[in-house]
Structure formats: structure tokens, C-alpha cells
Amino acid sequence: MADALVVSSLAKRFGGLQAVQDVSFTVREGETLALIGPNGAGKTTAFNLITGFYRPDAGSVRAFGAEMVGLRPYQVCARGLARTFQVAKPFGEMTVLDNVMTGAFLRDRAPAAARDKAREAIDFLGLSARERTTARDLTTIDQRRLEMARALATQPRVLLLDEVMAGLNAAEVDQAVLLVDKLAGRGLTIVIVEHLMRAVMAVAKHIVVLDHGQKIAEGAPGDVMANPEVIRAYLGSGYAR
């Protein structure tokens, strides 16, 4: 498999805070990689750097061999990297269909074509029965589905999911895990930020651990979970596999 995403020596400072420092990792095409760590570890900042919302102070982000640093978010998305947000950001007054069409318009400017692509994404994420519901009236799990559907409608090659399981109950987490697996089964490369270790272990083939903006571990899930530094910084001494 080729490299889908190569992050090299990424760094970002906000005033006196070094939010991300010398972070490097590679995501292989078709792989699901989880980015984990305690609150404030730099995970969402790394997402923002990768997708053009922040410009790094140093480092490189290459997707399928092309440099992403310096591009605006919509340009990064046009090159095949789509993301969701930790806090769902739908257009509340618009229907599910219209929300997802905003993503589809990235590649299909004709309304009929964009509508077809949007409906395909809506159906894939199990939202067909809600396509005419206004986004503000969706349940939490359906808002997560909407976020993923809108990103999917941009026809990405890499999908970055930022805590799509936050605020979900146990049954909804199981549904979300199935959705991530379904997206991976479509051939997408996935990078997921997630706090729920049950979900991480279910979906990820590779894990990168951040703490205070630095990478402290990387590898297969079982190896990372057994790493004493990861247990100390993130999982806690009571963690049992």
C-alpha cells in the first residue's frame, strides 16, 4: 500500500503554549489510524494543521505525495482530505439533504448531480428517513451521521473524524463503530481522534499517542496499550486490557 498521509515534524505554538511539537506519523492508504491522548494533548490542533485551519510553525503535511501546508481548508478538501468536527456544525435551519448537498457541491456544481451524490452519502450513513428533517431537530447520533455524510459527499480519499462518538450512549457508540467500519470498508483512509478506548480498539489498526503536544508512542493497538508511558500519561494505573 502507498502512503496516503505523511505528517513530518509538525509544530504549532500559541503564545507561550507549544500545542504541537515535532509530531510525525504516516497513514497508509486504506488504513484506519487513531490519534489518542489526554485532554490538551494536541490532537484537534493536529487535525486543524493537517486540514489547513491552522498553518504550522514548522513541518510538512503531504497527502498522496502533494504538500498541503499553505493551502486553505477548501483547497485541502478539494485534494481529497475531508473532516468532521468535535462539535457538530450543521446548518441548523437547513434540511439534512441541503446540508449534505453543500459538501457535494465541491465536485458537482449542477444541483441535480449534487443532490444525487448527497442522497448516496445520506443513504450510506443510514439517514434516508431524515433527509427532509432540519438539522437542528436531529438526535446527537444523527447529527454525527450528518457530519460524516457531509464529509463523504465531498468524495474524499482521506476522512478525518474528530471525536464522532463524543456524547453518545453505549448503544450509539456501537452504531458509530459500525459506521466507521463501513466507511473503512468503502476503501477510505481514516484518521480518527477518539477518547473511548473500546471504540479505538474496535476500529484502529494503528495508534499514535500524543501527550503535551508530543508523540509518546506509536504502533499496533495491543503494543501501544501495553506501553508503560501510555498507561502513565493517558490510561491510568488502573487500566486493564
Image: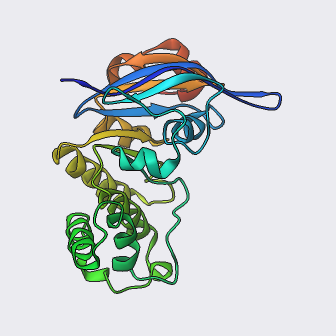
Q: Residue furthest right?
A: 16
Taking the view exactly as shown, the residue that stands out farthest to the front is 109
Q: Residue 19's spot in the image, x, y percent? A: 68, 30
| Depth order, front residue of 151/104 | 104
Residue depicted at 44% across the width and 53% down the height: 164
Vertical relation: 139 (above or below) 38: below
The quarter of the image holding the C terminus is: top left
In the image, residue 132 above or below residue 192: below
On the image, which quarter does residue 80 sit in?
top left
Relative depth, front residue between 85 and 170: 85
Q: Position of residue 237 (x, y in %)?
A: 56, 22
Residue drawn at x 50%, y 80% is 136
Q: Horizontal and vertical percent for residue 204?
A: 31, 34
Compared across the picture, whether 42 is left or right of 168 comes to: right
Which image quadrant for residue 146? bottom left
Q: How many marks?
A: 0
Question: Taking 183 as reference, is 212 above or below it?
Answer: above
Give x and y (percent) for residue 139.
44, 74
Above-or-below relation of 227 to 69: above
- Residue 237 can be seen, yes or no: no
The residue shown at (32%, 63%) is: 149
In the figure, is residue 79 to the left or right of 15?
left
Residue 190 in sight in this render? yes
In the displayed structure, does residue 186 sit left or right of residue 162?
left
Can you tell which quarter of the image residue 170 is in? Answer: bottom left
